[in-house]
Image (tube, rainbow, N blue to C red):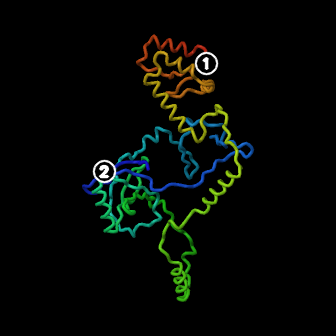
Amino acid sequence: MRAMWSGAVSFGLVSVPIKLYSATTNHDIRFHQVHAADGGRIKYKRTCSIDGEEVDYADIVKGYETEDGELITLDDEDLDSLPVATGHEIDVVEFVPADQIDPLLFDKSYYLEPEAKAAKPYALLREALVQTDRMAVVKVALRQRETLALLRVRDKAIVLQTMLWPDEVREPDFDILDTDVDLRPQELTMAASLVESLGADFDPADFHDDYRDAVVELIERKRTTGETRPAPVAEKRDEGPDSMTDLLSALQASVEAARSAAGGSGAGSGSTKSESSTPESDDEEKKPARSGSRSSSGTTKKAPARKPAARKKADSDEETAEPRKRARKPA
């Protein structure tokens, strides 16, 4: 397993350095939506519901619609102003009896692994929880958001069990539950007898996902009988990032802009980028340039301050002289 977070459990004057691992995994069979005729992947584009036009990832902001029908938008600057929890401390708030925790509050489970030097305090906390039959209520910041969680013991490991906030649990609002039902003693005795007849010790290994097993069997049968075809390779088109790759594309563009600002726009860098550009550069020339983005010639729109003045003019002249023709020049 690979650790997804590291920090320390803090209770009283004791601090236990730990690493956090996801305790569960998903084995669902995942399908792609494909065109029945040729097997091509189905793509979804981000379009505006008003004008029907496709919207670039950079032009999308978060919006909240009020109950009165008013729209409030939040851009990156607004989101950056919000308090972000980034601490790496799991602070114990209190120790509570295990039977007071409603399982309905449970969310995700994570294993805590102690650092080599923290094996003893880790074991001390684990055994204290077992002997007192209590769980530790903690607050922890995961993925930049503070969440409520529990520390509980499973075998020899301490489990961090994230929880829903109380207002996220809905109450059962069913009028029929308030109706008085007359239950006779004989009926209660018979129901209890039925429960006892089906009584057993729970072993999760006795249960299997029959649906998943059937799907795996169906796929394997089609594979062995030759009911397959090569997965088609879609032609690359200048369609911009789709909904599955837009974040990766944005990150890649940010990295390229940062490298250029750090020195990639020095002598000779602009012509090198231009010569290795792809036909996609033509379409990028037509798009409005964003702050820090690269032009089709490979240079940034704002040259770094340390670039020599003479070279800046030379680069500027080269950038405006037939950029589209040079973009198609073989490397």
Looking at the rendered structure, the secondary structure element under dot 2 is helix
Q: Residue furthest top?
A: 310
Looking at the rendered structure, the secondary structure element under dot 1 is loop
Q: Earlier in the sequence, mark 1 or mark 2?
A: 2
| Residue 90 marker | none
Do the CB atoms of the residues marked 1 and 2 lie less than 8 Å apart? no
> Looking at the image, which is closer to me, 155 or 40?
155
Residue tagged 2: 116
Type of residue at label 1?
A: Pro
Classify residue 35 by image quadrant.
Answer: top right
Compared across the picture, whether 2 is left or right of 282 comes to: left
293 relative to 185, above or below: above
Residue tagged 1: 330
Classify residue 295 by image quadrant.
Answer: top right
> Looking at the image, which is closer to me, 157 or 98?
157
> Looking at the image, which is closer to me, 293 or 154?
154
Q: CA distance from mark 1 to mark 2?
A: 57 Å
Type of residue at label 2?
A: Ala
- Residue 89 in percent (x, y) is at 33, 50
Compared across the picture, whether 23 is left or right of 177 comes to: left
| Residue for point 55% across, 13% down | 318
- Residue 251 in percent (x, y) is at 50, 35
| Residue for point 56% across, 20% down | 274
Q: Residue furthest front?
A: 224
- Residue 95 in percent (x, y) is at 33, 63
Q: For the residues carrying marks 1 and 2, which lies nearer the camera in this image?
A: 2
| Residue for point 56% across, 64% down | 208
- Residue 112 in percent (x, y) is at 38, 55
111 relative to 181, above or below: above
